[in-house]
Amino acid sequence: MVSMVRRNDERRAALVDAAIEVLAAEGARGLTFRAVDTEAAVPPGTASNYFANRDDLLTQAGARVYERLQPDEATIARQRASTRDREGYTALMHELVGRISAFRTGYLALLELRLEATRRPALRAVLTERVRADMAANLTYHEESGLPGDATAVRLLYLALNWLIVEQLTLPDMFSEAERDALVAAAVERIVTQR
């Protein structure tokens, strides 16, 4: 009699979260089923029962990082209640940079995944789809919220702040928190025109 491996969603999520931690700490080359099992503190062979192969694990890790970067309902409600001017926009961008920076391992894992996506078409497709969906959601939110600026401003802020986050997470001594905050405010001030 062959025993069936129980595959529950909670265990799968824990394994994918462990994969994110391994990616951040060891890079894509360090991502093995054994490393994920160790990080998740599960018996050896567990990850291989949940993922068809390493590509499957990479792809699911890529999707999971974006899930975890989404703001919670309280944050969304607070954002919607904020002012519809540059100051409100600046506060929104500060919150965004802070939220992403707080999930340091997730963002570092995402950088590893982006590099890996240059060699793995399936992963590239997942990441491209997710970034496009996030950009579309950001543009829709921007348009519905009545914030100043246009779609180009949203895209430019996305690009500028992403690189600021990369600098902060990979070279943490590059800018102080005060300098980072001043750069976020300057980016909004210079990129976002009033409607």
Image (cartoon, rainbow, N blue to C red):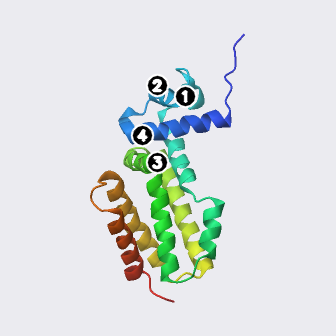
Above or below, comparing residue 160 to residue 143 in the picture: above
Q: Amino acid at mark 2?
A: Arg
Residue assigned mark 1: 47
Please give the name of the residue rendered at 53% of the width and 55% of the height, measured from the top-left corner: 69
Mark pair 2, 1: CA separation: 8 Å
Q: Earlier in the sequence, mark 2 or mark 4?
A: 4
Q: Which mark is residue 23?
A: 4
Q: Position of residue 38 (x, y in %)?
A: 48, 26
Q: Amino acid at mark 1?
A: Ala
Of residues 164 and 180, the one drawn nearer to the viewer in this rendering: 180
Horizontal side of residue 98 vs 82, given as left or right: left
Q: Tags 4 and 1 in contact by the CB under 8 Å rule?
A: no
Q: Earlier in the sequence, mark 3 or mark 2?
A: 2
Regarding mark 2 in the picture, which secondary structure is present there?
helix
Give the residue furthest to the top: 1
Label 2 vs label 4: CA separation?
13 Å
Sequence-wise first label, 3 or 4? 4
Q: Which residue is disc 2 drawn over?
A: 34
CA distance for labels 3 and 4: 9 Å
